[in-house]
Amino acid sequence: MARLPAALTVVTPAGRSILLLTVASYLVDTFGGWPVFQLIWVSCLMMLLVAVVLAVLPVRAVVELGVAPRRTVAGEGARVLVEARSASRLPVPGPLLDVPVGAREHLIRLPMLRPGHPVHRGIELDGLRRGVVPVGPATARRTDPLGLLRWTERWSGAIELLVLPRMVRVESLGGGAISDQEGTPSDEISMSDLAFHALREYVPGDDLRHVHWRSSAKASKLFVRQYHDTRRSHLTVVIDDYRDSYRDPEDFETAVSAAASIAARADRDGVELSLLCGTHAVSGRGLDGVLDACCRIQPGDTDPAMAAREALRLAPDTSWLVMLTGGQVSEQLAGRLRAGLPPEVSLLLVTADATEATLVTGPEAMRLMTLRTLDELPRAISALARTVQL
């Protein structure tokens, strides 16, 4: 079926019928000389003119959209807040407002908008899935009293509702192979850092600035100070976005949720965070930046080994790399990842697979975790923390 010209899309079926009746009555009156048809076409023409005048008259109204809360969690709800008001001294007769939320359109019939009297309405949302939900722009579906013309006017801009991945609370990931001076001391001993550790006997070559003279005088031999290494731990999370790595799309959602849960725990432990998934890369923006990125990531086609190398370029100070992938990934991936990492960087490879039992295996420098469901992550992290210090 051929589409109507754009200028005619504002004319409703009733309007087109009146227009045809006007033309037909005019022809019959002109060539047939029947006065009654003159009354018909004049009346129809007057109705059309009134509809056109109402359509071209400027109606000034403003709609402001908001969401509460600004960020919510998958599976929970939110509320879209709509505030409408007349932007002139003239009232706006009850408009029909169309507010799209994601793929759904919500129609709201507003009362008459009077100057200085804003109208508030709300749209309840529930069962939201992880992602970014666009809200708006709000458009008014306008028409004349007889319904001969119908048109829309944009009354607001668009906003976003961020739906964070579902997260579970996990235990502390451990003291850290490298920690800052405000955290748990590390096992690395340094001769020139800030966190004092112990005294030991002087050996040739030690810097005399670190000699502890009071202890040396009491023992009649030289003693020097030892320090803990106080560099800050850095956890980098990489989510494999290659869609063929996952048996089921829900496994990808499990991987994203597990990544967010691990990042939240590391943030509470005072660890620096970075995240990379496909084209989304975040470093130095804290937990909020990581969670916002988790809302936006989608399956793609990035090679996981290349993603790990890119993550090291993003965060060269990484001390632990956590890669999350799916059950369809190659068995050689762990070895490829380990071979591409510096010796001082530890690796945790988490495989989200609903068909396998949750299990933690592997040597300390390359821990492997199979994760069946997100709810089993706390138990798996507890098992990991008992055998390795992050």
Image (cartoon, helix red, strand yellow):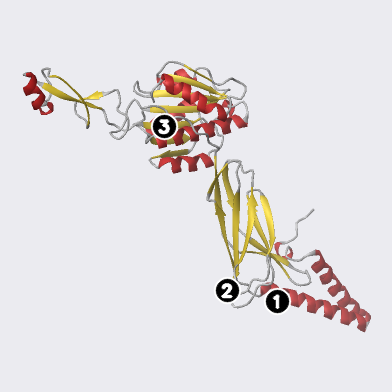
N-terminal of the pair, mark 3 or mark 2, is 2
Instruction: Describe the element under mark 1 as helix, strand or loop.
Output: helix
Q: How much space separates mark 3 and mark 1, taking CA atoms? A: 63 Å
What is the three-letter code of the residue carrying label 1?
Val
Q: What separation in Å lies between label 2 and label 1 (alpha carbons)?
A: 26 Å
Image: 4 above or below 313: below
Residue sitting at x 74%, y 65%: 8
Against 274, residue 57 (above or below) is: below
Q: Which mark is residue 217?
A: none
Mark found first going from the N terminus, 3 or 1: 1
Q: Are marks 2 and 1 in contact (CB under 8 Å)?
A: no
Image quadrant where one finds the C terminus: top left
Q: Nearer the viewer, mark 2 or mark 1?
A: 2
Q: Which residue is mark 3?
A: 236
Q: Horizontal and vertical percent for residue 115?
A: 59, 75
On residue 116, which mark appears?
A: 2
Residue 189 in the image, given as x and y percentages of width and height: 24, 23
